[in-house]
Amino acid sequence: MSNTKTNSSLKTLCRTAIFLALLIAVQFVTRSMGQYVTGSLVNLILIASGLMCGLWGGLAVAILSPICAFFIGIGPAFPQVVPAVALGNAVLVLLWVLIAGAKSAPIARQAIALVVAAVAKFLTLYLVVVKWLVPMVLTLNEKQTAVLSASFSFPQLITAAIGGVLAILLVPPLRRALKV
């Protein structure tokens, strides 16, 4: 492997690790601020990691972050929900990178990515958590069912959309500053 290729791979790996650490830190610091603040910032970081680290780096952050969050006590309360969150995160990153991954994607493509990815993440989490895990896999009391169902429904659409708007605003200047 050439030196340039090695340096590029190392930079991508380091950026990916930084995005993962940042995402976990943001979850930890904002956990008392509610789902709309924490979720929006998490989605911003997920999208930024995909756009700045490439598909594989973004997917690594998307999948590893809920696992790490669970083990340090700031993620989903039920281990069965962790893979669902990882899947929802992966769907968000995958669609953003496929639709708007180009370094200078026009705003129209970014807007399409925002809508498509937010709706897809919402639908993924709603179907997997609310329609499958809650009624068929998890044994929950009425209050737990209500809280989990509410958390993994409409707020997921809102936080994914807010994260997307923030990404549209913040990723281009970040790319310029880091020469990505």
Image (spheres, helix red, strand yellow):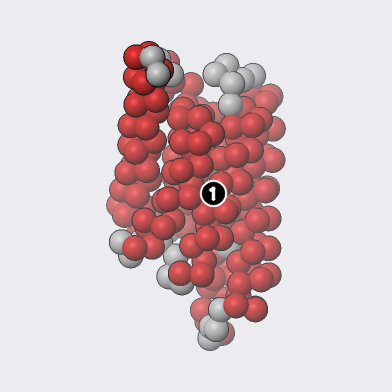
Residue identified by numbered label 1:
89
Location of residue 110 by image quarter? top right
Tell me the kind of residue under disc 1: Asn
Residue 155 image offset from top left, x and y in percent? 57, 57
Q: Quadrant of the N terminus?
A: top left
**Taking 47 as reference, is 66 above or below it?**
below
Residue 40 image offset from top left, x and y in percent? 48, 46
Q: Is residue 80 left or right of residue 21?
A: right
Location of residue 15 by image quarter? top left
Q: Residue at x 38, y 14 (%)?
A: 2
Residue 42 image offset from top left, x and y in percent? 45, 46
**Taking 166 as reference, is 175 above or below it?**
above
Q: Residue at x 37, y 58 (%)?
A: 69
Location of residue 135 by image quarter? bottom right
Mark 1, secondary structure of its residue: helix
Can you see residue 173?
A: no
Q: Residue lying furthest bottom in this view? A: 141
Q: Residue at x 58, y 26 (%)?
A: 101
Residue 139 image offset from top left, x and y in percent? 55, 84
